[in-house]
Image (tube, helix red, strand yellow):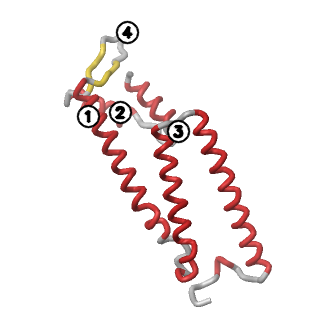
Amino acid sequence: MSGSEIMEKIAEQTAGRWKPSPGSIYPLLAWLQDNGYTKEVQPEESGTRRYTLSEKGKDFFKEQVKLKEKMQERLEFFAPPFLSVFWLTSHPEKVQEIQEPLSRFIRSVFNLRMALEKNPTDQAVREAGKVLSASAAKIEELSTRIKETNETFGINVSKVTADE
């Protein structure tokens, strides 16, 4: 691929969340080539440089994939307890009943993401989308019901303090 094709591919694969600039891609390509991870291929078009991974680059890429997987596993381990710390911090005694289900929910979302990363079939993505959409709808419904109940009793949830 050429540098511009790499930039387009990154933007496509991140759904537009990251659109790298030439100032970030071309120095990286130069570094990869200087270190033997890539090599330039014979140009098909005049002026367009294309690169491919060398054997050393393929090994480096495989190492990076393994490192990413290890980091995801660690993140999966730390994320549920870390995220649950932010859950109802003004009333920690009331949250104990939902701590385990919350941790389980967060862990299952991380596991789903990792499974889809390894096997993103159309059917699996569709099924995951349906389950996540249905789950989000139920949580949104519950959230609305709780908010409406609090408003019915004249409680302004945003102004409730730990002493109340």
SS at badge 3: loop
Position of 121 with respect to 131 (left or right) is left
The quadrant in which residue 38 appears is top left
Q: Percent position (x, y) of residue 155?
A: 72, 82
Residue at 55% x, 80% y: name it: 90
Q: Is residue 12 or residue 59 the one in the foreground?
A: 59
Q: Is residue 117 above or below residue 149?
A: above
Q: Which residue is mark 1?
A: 60
Kind of residue indicated by mark 2: Ile
Q: Nearer the viewer, mark 1 or mark 4?
A: 1
On residue 16, the disc is 3
Q: Work out how far the residue at label 2 is from the one at label 1, CA to CA, in angstroms.
A: 18 Å
Q: Which residue is mark 2?
A: 25
Q: Is residue 125 above or below residue 96?
A: above
Q: Nearer the viewer, mark 2 or mark 1?
A: 1
SS at badge 1: helix
The quadrant in which residue 118 appears is top left
Count of number-bearing discs: 4
Kind of residue indicated by mark 3: Gly
Kind of residue indicated by mark 1: Phe
- Quarter of the rendering occupied by the C terminus: bottom right
Q: Work out how far the residue at label 1 is from the one at label 4, CA to CA, in angstroms.
A: 27 Å
Q: Earlier in the sequence, mark 2 or mark 3?
A: 3
